[in-house]
Amino acid sequence: MKKTTGQCHCGAIRYEVNGDLTGVINCHCGDCRRWHGNFSAYAVARLEEFHFTRGEDKLVWYESSEKARRGFCPDCGSSIFKDNKDGKTIVLSVGALDAPTGMSHLKDIFTDSKGDWYEL
Ligand SMILES: [Zn+2]
Ligand SMILES: [Zn+2]
């Protein structure tokens, strides 16, 4: 079974996924651009295959909209999770994954609201 690990910048929060992730989804919506500083790169994991290996109690959630909240480390500020509140999945910021990820780009979403400083 595929195992993927990741952490925030300072390492206070670590997690692993024992199962398949989706390919990389770049989201160009305004919420992601403000939160990440640019468009975001995500992969989706099944919640039942995800668990924290360190620092679960540290994680802080920010309610970014009625449909989503974003999880970050209060020590280093890394934004490492998005939760679409479906109770089944957790969205991982792929920049936080440990290399090699073996992943590749799947798709771009919300391209209508992309920033005007880059081309797709
Ligand atoms: Zn951290
Ligand atoms: Zn987005």
Image: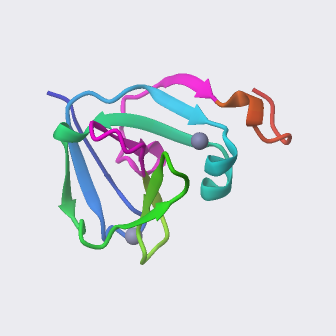
Q: Quadrant of the N terminus?
A: top left
Magenta span has 61? Answer: no
> Is 101 on the left or on the right of 78, as rendered?
left
The quadrant holding residue 8 is bottom left
Image coordinates for residue 38, horizontal then vertical, percent? 68, 49
Residue furthest out toward the right: 116
In the image, is residue 112 above or below residue 63? above
Locate ligand 1 by image quadrant.
bottom left
User: Closer to the camera, 76 or 88?
Assistant: 88
User: Closer to the camera, 96 or 28?
Assistant: 28
Magenta span has 102? Answer: yes
Q: Residue at x 47, y 64 (%)?
A: 62
Image coordinates for residue 120, horizontal then vertical, percent? 75, 26
Image coordinates for residue 67, horizontal then vertical, percent? 49, 45
Magenta region: 82-109
Residue furthest out toward the front: 66
Image coordinates for residue 109, horizontal then vertical, percent? 61, 28
Q: Residue at x 52, y 30 (%)?
A: 25
Residue furthest out toward the top: 106
Q: Residue at x 38, y 47 (%)?
A: 97
